[in-house]
Image (spheres, grey):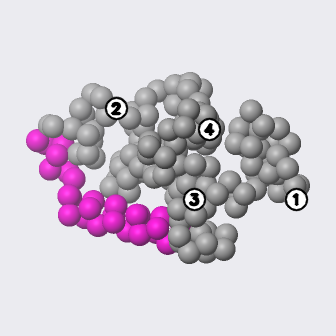
Amino acid sequence: GTGAGPDVVTEHAGIPTIAAIVEADEALKEVNLREEVSLVAAGGIRNGADVAKAIALGADAVYIGTAALVAIGCRVCQMCYAGTCRKGIATQDPLFRKRLDYVEGGKRVARYIEAMTEELSMLTQQAGNTDVSKLEKDDLRALNLEASALTGVKMAGMEAPLYSL
């Protein structure tokens, strides 16, 4: 995944997840396939707020990669491809693998997901919803021009997005 990629690639190549969700959602609607295709977002999903934003912008679901690895103990050294993970996470080396406590790692990921779920629940309720799938773009407000331009979300304190792609 992107967690093992060089910084210059992860920070400056591709398209931001939030913009990709909006573009994909709109493209699927244009060709009348939105109800037939599940839109799953990934990349930069770190907490319940990121999940809420992704769902509100059109994602049906999200998945996490690097964030779960960090919960296990990953230090994001970006060497997964080398198989020499000193934490024992991304390796087949028996010496390194002994360093990972799988039971404790599983518990950490479970606690992380529970915390994300609680955050998502709070934000869903704060938006006046009882079901996360009811979140929509109008439940969000952009705090800067770039976010508004990328997503079409209204600026905080304004009635319409300043720009729309």
Look at discs 3 and 2 and give the one toward the viewer. 3
| 3D distance between C-alphas at marks 3 and 4 | 18 Å
Residue 50 visible in rendering: no
Q: Earlier in the sequence, mark 3 or mark 2?
A: 3
Q: Is residue 41 above or below residue 140?
A: above
Mark 1 or mark 4, whichever is nearer to me: 4
Dominant SS type (magenta): helix
Q: Earlier in the sequence, mark 1 or mark 4?
A: 4
For label 2, the residue is 79
Residue contact at pointers 3 and 4, CB within 8 angstroms: no
Q: Are marks 1 and 4 in contact (CB under 8 Å)?
A: no
Nearest to viewer (mark 1 / mark 2): 1
Which residue bears the numbered disc 4?
Answer: 26
* Mark 4 residue type: Glu
Q: Between residue 15 and residue 10, name the one nearer to us.
A: 15
Are the residues tagged 1 and 2 within 8 Å (C-beta)? Answer: no
Q: Marks 3 and 2, Cα distance to the nearest angstrom?
A: 31 Å
Q: Which residues are magenta?
A: 94-120
Q: Nearer the viewer, residue 92 or 148?
A: 148
Left or right: residue 162 compared with residue 114: right
Image point 80% across, 51% down: which residue?
154
Residue bearing mark 3: 52
Query: Judging from the image, what secondary structure is the residue with disc 2 in?
Result: loop
The amino acid beneath tag 3 is: Ala
Residue 3 percent location from the top left of the image: 42, 37
